[in-house]
Image (cartoon, grey):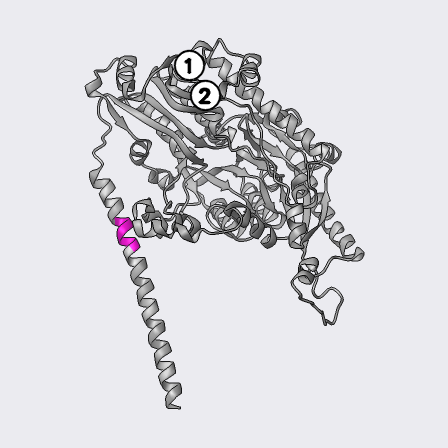
């Protein structure tokens, strides 16, 4: 008895001690983060004063919009927890720079950046609007890629390091096929789908790409590359697609240095970066010593976003970014979080209309249906709903879009993929490999259906097929109703096929090519609002991770990188776990690698 007392006391003491230690660690991290934030703020002497130049660093990933930072263990141990650059903040800064009399121009510094073509296109469009103010844009790069070069061609002066490179290589992507890997592990996938082109399941059941999947990607990449080349040619009058393709295919232009790029008229000047201040000063007609370089965050921080929420005449912008999941964090579209937001906006008398900004490859069919129904409720209140499509608005992303009163798509958006599939893993072979045997005792044959440890029988497969086809019917009928199209026509352009935006407009899936600003203006015109506020949702709530902008400088955490010791890559490991954990029925587009550097 006494022994048990001491053991219980000791365990309570140890538990309390661990809790205190953990609390202390968290408190230290918060203090470090707050100190870093305060230090950054207090040491930042930037001001938007006369002769200012907005500096945009096109390096790293460009995300869609600001989000609360989710906990990411791999980022934490890697010392890489930092705020990501967003398209929304960059465009806001560019717009503010055009209107601010103290800003003389924009300096684009192009490095290694990663984003989808539509993101680069939206950024480029904002810079073209900026040029209407009469202010100059100067670009410099040690390395230009497909995406950054496409953006930089709007510059009045396009400069490059003499030893730099323009890595123009065309559009393409690598599709991984996991079947052989899963065969070795002992897992096979049972697939139920609707649609010839619904190729999202192919990596799990095939070792190579099917002909229909290859055909649709050939068309998709070709059409999007034409848009990019036409945009480049519009600004660089001496270039056209055939010339660019020739430089890529025959001259291996991405391996050439600045002198060759200057001769090929891809750039205007070859300069070392240390000399750029003089060129910028000369271009905007300002004394070099009076140049004042400012960051986008400084201009954005001066915008009063609270005015939109306080306005009695609001246009709400709801960002639906990421995969549609039944649950999930801030980087996903969680219907349990989105439906209450949509319902609240529908019932808020101050909200006169809404733009749904969709950047999603789809995901859960159930989650897509819940969000779609909530959007129908919003419209039932007599409020106009427009959709602005970003990089992707496909499969479940199109499901939630198709009922809108007006759909705008970025010229490089990927959309469509009207189809549904079921993907159910079977680990029966794995069980045998590792010496496990499972037995079921139940009152009904399907009490354990579906089960990872057993293959589906014919009757179960038939039942699943019926369920998937029912989901497809819902999808097709929703598109037909929303787009005012015959069901037969939706079936013809459906089949799981993905479309580029221009083709999607031709076949009626999209109303107009345009950007978020165009969608907002349409809602304003529809509601006859000339003076209105813009409110953004979901509202960003800072977490502890937002107070730790850059843990790379904390040596003790940096040393934890040694924990990243897997036999396979983190990306592949996370992919396998995600696939095994996802819901069986999905409305999701095939994986298309379109983040270009």
Q: Which residue has dot 2 on it?
A: 166
Mark number displayed over residue 267: 1
Does the segment drawn in magenta span residue 33? yes
SS class, disc 1: loop
Rendered location of residue 379, percent (x, y): 56, 41
Rendered location of residue 497, percent (x, y): 67, 34
The mark tally for this picture is: 2
Q: Image point 35% across, 81% down: which residue? A: 9
In the orientation shown, which residue stands out farthest toward the bottom?
A: 1
Rendered location of residue 111, percent (x, y): 40, 28
Does the segment drawn in magenta span residue 470? no
Q: Which residues are magenta?
A: 29-34
Viewer-proximal residue among 190 and 512: 190
At label 2, counting other C-alpha atoms closer than 10 Å, the crowd grade (few under 14, some 14-19, many 20 or more) is many
In the orientation shown, which residue stands out farthest toward the right?
A: 458
Q: Image point 51% across, 29% down: which residue? A: 118
Q: Is residue 535 visible?
A: yes
Rendered location of residue 333, percent (x, y): 52, 46
């Amino acid at each position: 008895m006494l022994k048990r007392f001491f053991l219980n006391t000791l365990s309570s003491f140890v538990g309390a001690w661990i809790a205190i230690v953990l609390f202390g660690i968290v408190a230290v991290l918060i203090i470090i983060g707050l100190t870093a934030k305060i230090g950054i703020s207090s040491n930042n002497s930037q001001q938007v004063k006369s002769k200012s130049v907005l500096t945009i660093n096109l390096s790293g990933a460009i995300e869609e919009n600001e989000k609360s930072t989710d906990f990411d263990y791999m980022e934490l141990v890697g010392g890489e927890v930092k705020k990501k650059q967003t398209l929304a903040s960059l465009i806001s800064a560019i717009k503010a720079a055009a209107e601010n009399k103290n800003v003389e121009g924009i300096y684009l510094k192009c490095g290694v950046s990663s984003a989808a073509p539509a993101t680069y296109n939206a950024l480029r469009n904002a810079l073209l609007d900026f040029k209407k103010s009469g202010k100059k844009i100067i670009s410099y790069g040690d390395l230009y890629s497909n995406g950054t070069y496409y953006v930089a061609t709007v510059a009045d002066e396009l400069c490059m390091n003499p030893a730099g490179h323009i890595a123009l290589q065309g559009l393409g992507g690598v599709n991984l096929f996991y079947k052989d890997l899963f065969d070795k592990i002992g897992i096979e996938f049972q697939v139920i789908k609707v649609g010839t082109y619904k190729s999202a399941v192919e990596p799990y059941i095939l070792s190579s790409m099917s002909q229909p999947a290859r055909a649709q990607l050939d068309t998709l990449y070709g059409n999007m590359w034409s848009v990019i080349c036409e945009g480049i040619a519009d600004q660089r009058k001496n270039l056209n697609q055939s010339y660019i393709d020739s430089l890529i295919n025959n001259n291996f232009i991405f391996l050439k240095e600045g002198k060759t790029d200057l001769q090929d008229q891809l750039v205007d000047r070859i300069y070392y970066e240390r000399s750029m201040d003089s060129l910028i000063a000369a271009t905007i007609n300002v004394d070099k010593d009076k140049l004042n370089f400012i960051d986008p965050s400084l201009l954005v921080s001066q915008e009063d976003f609270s005015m939109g929420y306080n306005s009695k005449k609001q246009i709400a912008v709801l960002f639906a970014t990421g995969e549609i999941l039944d649950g999930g964090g801030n980087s996903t579209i969680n219907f349990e979080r989105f439906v209450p937001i949509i319902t609240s906006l529908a019932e808020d008398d101050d909200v006169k209309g809404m733009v749904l900004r969709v950047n999603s490859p789809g995901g859960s069919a159930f989650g897509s249906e819940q969000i779609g129904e909530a959007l129908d409720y919003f419209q039932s209140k007599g409020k106009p709903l427009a959709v602005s499509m970003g990089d992707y608005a496909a499969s479940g992303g199109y499901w939630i879009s198709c009922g809108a009163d007006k759909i705008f798509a970025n010229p490089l958006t990927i959309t469509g993929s009207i189809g549904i599939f079921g993907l159910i893993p079977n680990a029966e072979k794995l069980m045998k490999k590792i010496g496990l045997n499972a037995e079921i005792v139940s009152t009904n044959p399907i009490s354990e259906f579906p089960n990872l440890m057993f293959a589906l029988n014919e009757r179960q497969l038939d039942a699943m097929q019926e369920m998937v086809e029912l989901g497809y019917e819902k999808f097709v009928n929703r598109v037909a109703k929303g787009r005012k199209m015959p069901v037969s026509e939706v079936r013809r352009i459906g089949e799981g096929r993905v479309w580029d935006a221009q083709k999607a407009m031709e076949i009626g899936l999209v109303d107009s090519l345009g950007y978020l600003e165009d969608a907002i203006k349409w809602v304003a015109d529809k509601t006859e609002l000339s003076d209105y506020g813009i409110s953004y949702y979901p509202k960003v709530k800072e977490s502890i991770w937002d107070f730790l902008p850059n843990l790379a400088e904390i040596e003790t955490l940096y040393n934890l990188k040694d924990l990243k010791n897997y036999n396979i890559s983190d990306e592949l490991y996370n992919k396998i776990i995600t696939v095994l954990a996802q819901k069986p029925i999905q409305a999701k587009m095939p994986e298309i690698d379109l983040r270009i550097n």
